[in-house]
Image (cartoon, helix red, strand yellow):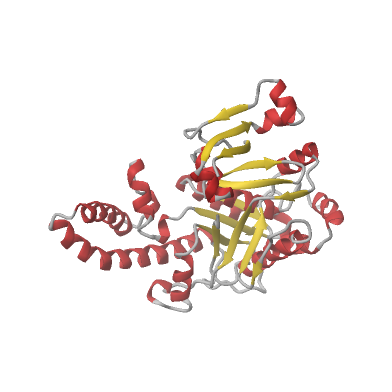
Amino acid sequence: MGFKCGIVGLPNVGKSTLFNALTQTAAAQAANYPFCTIEPNVGDVAVPDPRIEKLAAIAKSIDIIPTRITFVDIAGLVRGASKGEGLGNQFLANIREVDAIAHVLRCFEDDDITHVEGKIDPVSDAETVETELMLADLDSLERRIIPIEKKAKGGDKDSKEQFTLMSKAIALLRDGKPARNAELTPEEREPYRQLGLMTQKPVLYVCNVDEGSAANGNAFSRRVEEKAAKEGARSVTISARIEEEVAQLVAEERADFLQSIGLEEPGLNRMIRTGYDLLGLITFFTVGPKEARAWTVTKGSRAPQAAGVIHTDFEHGFIRAETIAYADYIAGSGEAGARDAGKFRLEGKEYVVSDGDVMHFRFNA
């Protein structure tokens, strides 16, 4: 499952520095984990999860394969992008292809780095980008809704439903609100997502602070945190310069360096995990002597869907899922102990997978 988080931002906010740190992290991970691929503008990184190490230690697994998330470095945006200014068309095309947006905001002062707007105001920067995306979404919908409305008036059921959803989005956008603010029934969520609106995508605000503010943030990042809280969005505070330096260190030196500046882990770890959570994803595990492996499913997925992530034949021929909760697997020191404690379960087609489940699937070939 290829989940993509696009990194966006105005010029000179530290977006490229942050992405470089991500790709260096991905390159370093390649030495430990298989299937790590990188393209010039794509960083495919492992989601940090200490649980898989503990599971592997108990099962004496030879290989450890974490779950992954892809970050895409999207061309910089300038005011007027919705009308094609700068690399606007490229920016808009790329952002439509990602599942979520990591919006890098400049939260540091530096007289040597010019700000495109002439002042440091991360909340205003966020609004500039959001406005361009809303304008582009509105333009797209207003053009697309005309033929849909004609079909709806002609009695076409699907067109009526689509017209209703498009009208909801247009009303929000005309009111200066992103499409993700729409109130939807459970049945409307998927067709609404299929409208392909950029402002419907979940947002992670990445506050890029100076080195001295990496541990506790600053006045700029706190304003962004307040904005995120009001919107129901997420935010993380990191220093892109520190992250780039950490990514270049050998593993043995990282812990000491981070401790010296008051950090328990790289900020990128928090960014990766938050991006993963933002996409509504959870992890289940398969564990054995050959490998301990993490798999990604969306929250609410049922057991057959989880089986299908491993192989489509597993979903089509699904019979049962042998399931142990992560905590029970650890407490029992493995499958045998969990069985003895009565924590081993056989779950059927309606079982909703929980984050951390250790699973083995029975299926008809």
Q: Residue 298: in sight, yes or no?
A: no
Q: Is residue 14 above or below residue 262?
A: below
Horizontally, is 93 left or right of 10 in the view? left
- Residue furthest left in the image: 154
Q: Nearer the viewer, residue 52 or 173?
A: 52
Q: Residue at x 69, y 45 (%)?
A: 49
Horizontally, is 19 left or right of 347 in the view? right
Q: Residue 270: in sight, yes or no?
A: yes
Q: Quadrant of the C terminus?
A: top right
Q: Is residue 296 above or below residue 323?
A: below
Q: Indicate the position of residue 195 as horizontal and vertical percent values.
A: 35, 58
Q: Indicate the position of residue 324 as horizontal and vertical percent values.
A: 64, 31
Q: Residue at x 70, y 54 (%)?
A: 213
Horizontally, is 47 left or right of 125 in the view? right
Horizontally, is 117 left or right of 260 in the view? left
Q: Nearer the viewer, residue 90 or 38?
A: 38
Q: Indicate the position of residue 296 as horizontal and vertical percent values.
A: 58, 48
Q: Indicate the position of residue 76 as horizontal and vertical percent values.
A: 53, 72
Classify residue 212 by image quadrant: bottom right
Q: Residue at x 20, y 52 (%)?
A: 157
Q: Is residue 183 above or below residue 328?
A: below
Q: Quadrant of the N terminus?
A: bottom right
